[in-house]
Amino acid sequence: MVQTNATRTVLDPDVQQQEALFAALVQTVQQFFGGFPALFRPVTDPREWAYITYPLPAVLGAGLLLFLLRLGARRQIQHLLRGNGPSAAKFQTLFGVPGCPHGDTVAYLCRQVDVAETQEAVTRLTETLIRRKVLYRYRLLDEYFLVVVDGTGCLTFPTRHCPHCLTRTVQDHTVYYHPVLEAKLVTTTGWVFSLMTEFIENPAAYPTKQDCELKAFYRLVARLKRRFPRLPICLLLDSLYAGGPTFTICERYHWPYIITLQAGDLPTVHQEFEALCRLEPENVLHYRTGVQLQTRQDYRWANDISYVDSDRQAHTVTVFECLETTPPAAGERTTTRFKWITSFRVTAQRVLTLANEGGRLRWKIENEGFNVQKNGGYALEHAYSRHPTASKVFYLLLQMAHLLAQLLEYGSLFRQAFPKGVGSAKNLAWRLLEAWRNLRLDSAAVQQWLGTRRRIYFDSS
């Protein structure tokens, strides 16, 4: 006797959970972005139509699943998704092709597509969430979207990988590597969405001066301004960017900023800050937070600090500082100093927001961003291809998958189906892989999900 989907849903709780999880995925993608094929609408297909078996959305969709399901290596597409009946049926329903493309087919297409067009596909996802006001509640001071710019290592090779490799010599051993610079939109709830990527690479094999994070920063912010000329952005930056060129750019673009200020940065600013704090002792705030209010935060600030950079450009900035004392651990309290330089004018009413909902969110690109992508199953540092163009496209597909995974995990459809959660984001990816490989659904059921409008809201706790 063949059981229908409805019968199996009633009898088998595992099938019911798999259906709920897969439905949450396809409905989330459909409702916000118009379906899986629409994710790749900005990318043109460079292949000869006469020789195409799989259309571009199906091939790049397989690459997206490589990261969304956290397969860890390109060959896993062949082992886990190809030759699997339920997987083939899902590709037929979602992409209109009778099966999953081979991992080599994905790599071959990634070598040919335009990197800028793939970047636009990533940028449009975050832009869509902004336009649909999903992210409005997370704006700083109800106005500014928080964008963190930071770099990280991506690929490392013992020998030269391509003419654009950066090089570093350690103890007579040369390392060839490819870092990237990311502009990510972050929220207080832990969302980290890629907005734009700048690849840090040399123009040729033996340049006079290597490319670096600062040079990439100037290119990235110029692109960001062209792409979002009217978007109210507040930049959150580390101490590398504390200086006149960054201040000048932000003033020209009308972008406020909050930048980490280290002890050795801008000595004259530190000196004037200390002098003004002595003259304005009222610019302090003491605040308690945490469990049973055991964490103490002591703030002080100074506005209207004058700074003249090396190009003799004058800037007026504000510095504010937080000394955070945490509850006793191993018998003693620990105190951590946080210090920022900003274009905002700080007041007693603003300082908590600017610190806890602004400056301190810069770390989210490290924790919820790069760390998750490196150690949370996405395998960011794995070489999915040695081809220079393909490696960039795979990187951008990873950013798309990370965004979709966050929407799924924090969305109401998933939380209604799994009110107690599934333990971790890795477990969620594993369950999604199980559903993709094992759940048998007819096309009519999936089309019904795609055609059903559901109210999706997100956990903001």
Image (cartoon, rainbow, N blue to C red):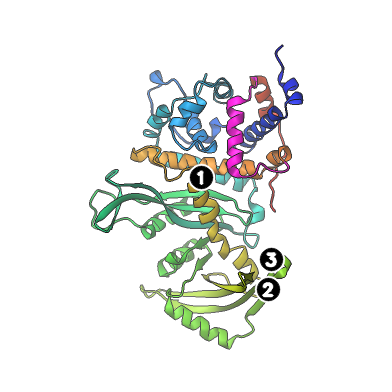
**Mark 1 — residue?**
123
Frontmost residue, 228 versus 40 = 40
Q: Residues within 10 Å of mark 1 (few under 14, many from 20)?
A: many
Q: Which mark is residue 287?
A: 2
* Position in image of residue 461 (x %, y %): 70, 53
- Label 1 sits on a secondary structure element that is helix
* Position in image of residue 218 (x %, y %): 40, 58
In this picture, is 152 found above or below 326? above
> Is residue 41 visible in this depiction of the protein?
no
Magenta stretch: includes residue 389: no
What whole-number distance in Å separates the C-alpha atoms at marks 3 and 1? Answer: 36 Å
Q: Residues within 10 Å of mark 3 (few under 14, many from 20)?
A: few
Magenta stretch: includes residue 440: yes
In this picture, is 136 found above or below 423? below
Judged left or right of residue 423, residue 341 is left
Numbered range of the magenta stretch? 419-442
At 44% across and 33% down in the image, what residue appears? 74
Q: Which mark is residue 384?
A: none
What whole-number distance in Å separates the C-alpha atoms at marks 1 and 2? Answer: 38 Å
Residue 312 image-quadrant placement = bottom left
